[in-house]
Amino acid sequence: MATIGARSTGDEGNRTVTHLDAAAAAQPGQEEAGPQLSAALSQASGGLPEAPDPLDRPACRGSVGRESHRARLQRIGNSPRWGGSGFRNTHPVSLQINPFDVRMAADFAFGGKRRAPKGPLPLLRDGATRLQGPPPGGLRLTWLGHSTVLLEVDGVRLLTDPVFGLRASPVSFAGPRRYHPMPLDLHELGRLDAILLSHDHYDHLCAPTWRRLVRGACPGWSGLVITTLGVGAHLERLGVAPSQIRELDWSEGAFVESAGSRVEVIATPSQHFSGRSATDRNRTLWAGLAVVGPRHRVFFSGDTGATPEHAEIGRDLGPFDVAMFEIGAWHPAWGAVHLGPARAFEAFQAMGARALMPIHWATFDLALHNWSEPAETLRQLADAAGASTTVWQPQIGGSVSPGAVADSPWWRDVP
């Protein structure tokens, strides 16, 4: 793989990335996307059936909509990851998700595992008070469940993959239902300088949450969104202004500024897939996201399988103070696109981060394992490796920062 961030802006030291200063801006000299590409992308948001597809030409209303549509097609068509009909991983993957797979059917029928907790999960609900002041050391992470984390990095406040809805589903009446309420509601988040969105799956891009955001449910949100190529079409459809969306290809970056503070968000390779219906597989890009500040660096994996690129990301953009890797909703058959606890621990070690905070567990029943199995397995691995102090496992709603980590195995007390 080429060095992460292969193109330089010239005056930003050694951080060599391509910066996007306008939403979905096309590179100079690029040719207009042809009809074949437009047709191939026309189903990109088919998982949102309640409105016309935002990548379909008739859905682009007004000059702003047409321009963002045109620029998006140009940038997608020129991406090294675009394969003509969809985005591709660096390393080929086989999802191996077969409803008639014998072992998987046996797990469903006879596994006997407690895929959902029998009792309520303990939540820390004092965040509205706890988060009023800045973190003393400049870095604090507050886990709100699944992959939703409030990041405070060197004076900038970011929210990852916000899912505040009841279900991870295209419909409100069926699909995986959350185990717990949110420990903080949107209006309690305070100042929010940007939202980071790793990909378009329903447990990461939650349409009800975005509708609330657009209607002003989080008064402190600046309106800025940093996401991956193509995903902006979903957001525009949900009401986000095109001028507020930054879509990144891998190795591209965008700055987030707040009251004299600034961090850089860089999209990094991951091994996954995308789509919100049966007809739009891989029409939008997926990525990890690195947050690089003047004093601290944080890595957010999004969804990913194991890849040697995690070591390269650590080498090129690290060292990271903390890396957030997904540990839940996994199965041996999904190893190419989801990590699970053992591979998450290996990825953390390969990246060379100073601490690991697991995400993507304890909120939705998305797999076949015991709901707490990922956390317990990770704890055992860390203890065996003598690395228990470097694995941060806060309660839902809890905050962690260097030197201030409360990570007792709280899940063991849940019936």
Image (cartoon, grey):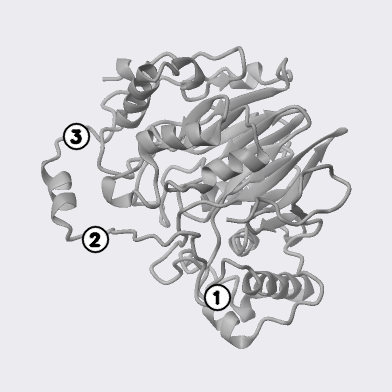
**Distance CA(mark 1)–CA(mark 3):** 40 Å
Q: In the structure shown, which secondary structural element does the residue marked by tag 2 occupy? A: loop
Q: Position of residue 119 (x, y in %)?
A: 29, 23
User: Residue at the location (59% across, 81% down)?
Assistant: 38
Disc with the residue nearer the chain's start (2 vs 1): 1
The disc label shown at residue 98, or none? 2
Q: Residues within 10 Å of mark 3 (few under 14, many from 20)?
A: few
Disc 1 marks a residue whose amino acid type is Leu
Q: Nearer the viewer, residue 268 or 42?
A: 268
Whether residue 216 is situated above or below residue 55 in the rendered picture: above
**Distance CA(mark 2)–CA(mark 1):** 26 Å
The disc label shown at residue 41, or none? 1
Q: In the structure shown, which secondary structural element does the residue marked by tag 1 occupy? A: helix
Whether residue 259 is situated above or below residue 19 in the rendered picture: above
Residue that label 3 marks:
113
**Distance CA(mark 3)–CA(mark 2):** 20 Å
Quarter holding residue 35: bottom right
